[in-house]
Amino acid sequence: MRAKASDRGPYPAGRVAVVWPSRTVVLLLTLAFATGLRVPGWVQYLPFAASLVFFGLPHGAVDHLVPSRLAGRDADGRSVLAVVLLYLVLSGLCLALWFTAPIAAFVLFVCVTVFHWGAGELHALLFFGPDGLSGMGRASRALLLVLRGGLPMLVPLLFFPDAYRGVATAAAGLFGADATVLAGAFSPAFRLGVWGALAVVTALFLLRAAGDLAGGRRALLPVALETLLLFAFFAVVPPVLAVGLYFTLWHAPRHVARLVLLDPAGARYLRAGRPGRALARFARDAAPLTALALALLAGLYLAVPGATEAPGSLLAIYLVLVSALTLPHASLVTYMDGRQGVWKKTRPSPGDGPGPLTP
């Protein structure tokens, strides 16, 4: 069944089950680290370890069902094969780049992640966020995408350049490359440029969105506060821990909620106030390809020449796998955005039933 015209705004269950828990965790950790909390190094890797089976890796494991559900029909061989081919081609090219030009692969990974996470933030704010944002034009939405996607990738560079360099070095070192070529990216001059770029994008977004929304400018306040919260979070929490938590508890659950709403049965469970049943249905759909991804991770560990059992090396291998999966996943999400009207002056369609999903 299509969403009724009266069903304006996000499903309350989505906001309660997805948005507020992640905000609460981010706020509490920001306050804790800002007031002096320190954790052992091994603890910082736990969110990435949890993401292997908890939201992170599984959140892209139902991509093969997305085209058919967007069309309001059961999965068919043609649509599944199209997604499989997309993954084989783009993931294969990405892995080939890691083995032949790992520095370029790392930079590509950062750029694609900024775009993909920004797109996820845009959809989540339009659908789960405050009423009134649907009046934003394409320029405002593009600026919001860049701003929110840039926070997890750029703020740690500003405040933790040595840790950021360590991750880049570990990833490049898996393939015998020397990451010193990236030294300029950690210099004070480059980081000053990043500061300036973030400031300009923020100012342009606020000015442009305020002009678009006119009477609905009040909706910008919660967006600005949430953006400020995320900036503070990535500024004070160690980057491996911060990015791992963001991936596992912020980005992935929002996308899972989007996918649940695309599934007619999952959407019915949410409307009935049974999010646990909806999540269990998603977990069932995601289990086979999550297991396949874990098998690929084990294969990468055996295939990568510089792999060791050190936590930094294991994280680097996982990031290589994630980068290879993110490229086709981001491409499919971009297709979803187009079908669901993310770039139109309207709230995106939840996609809870058959029929075309663009408004």
Image (tube, rainbow, N blue to C red):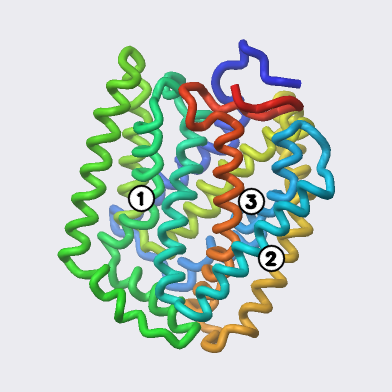
Residue at x 61% of width, y 47% of height: 332
Residue 355 to residue 89: above or below: above
What is the x, y in percent for residue 295? 72, 72
Q: Is residue 235 left or right of residue 271?
A: left
The three-letter code of the residue at mark 2 reads Ala
Mark 3 residue crowding within 10 angstroms, few (<14) / some (14–19) / many (20+): many
Residue 137 to residue 22: above or below: above
Q: Quadrant of residue 86?
A: bottom right
Q: Nearer the viewer, residue 198 or 68?
A: 68
What is the x, y in percent for residue 188? 17, 66
The three-letter code of the residue at mark 1 reads Leu
| Quadrant housing the C terminus | top right
The residue at which mark 2 appears reads as 293
Of callouts 2 and 1, the N-terminal one:
1
Residue at x 23% of width, y 36% of height: 203
The three-letter code of the residue at mark 3 reads His
Which numbered dot is residue 59?
3
Instruction: Let me know if residue 50 appears in the view.
Output: no
Which numbered dot is residue 151?
1
Residue at x 56% of width, y 64% of height: 322
What is the x, y in percent for residue 138? 40, 31
Gap in angstroms between the C-alphas marked 1 and 3: 21 Å
Mark 2 residue crowding within 10 angstroms, few (<14) / some (14–19) / many (20+): some
Q: Quadrant of residue 302?
A: bottom right
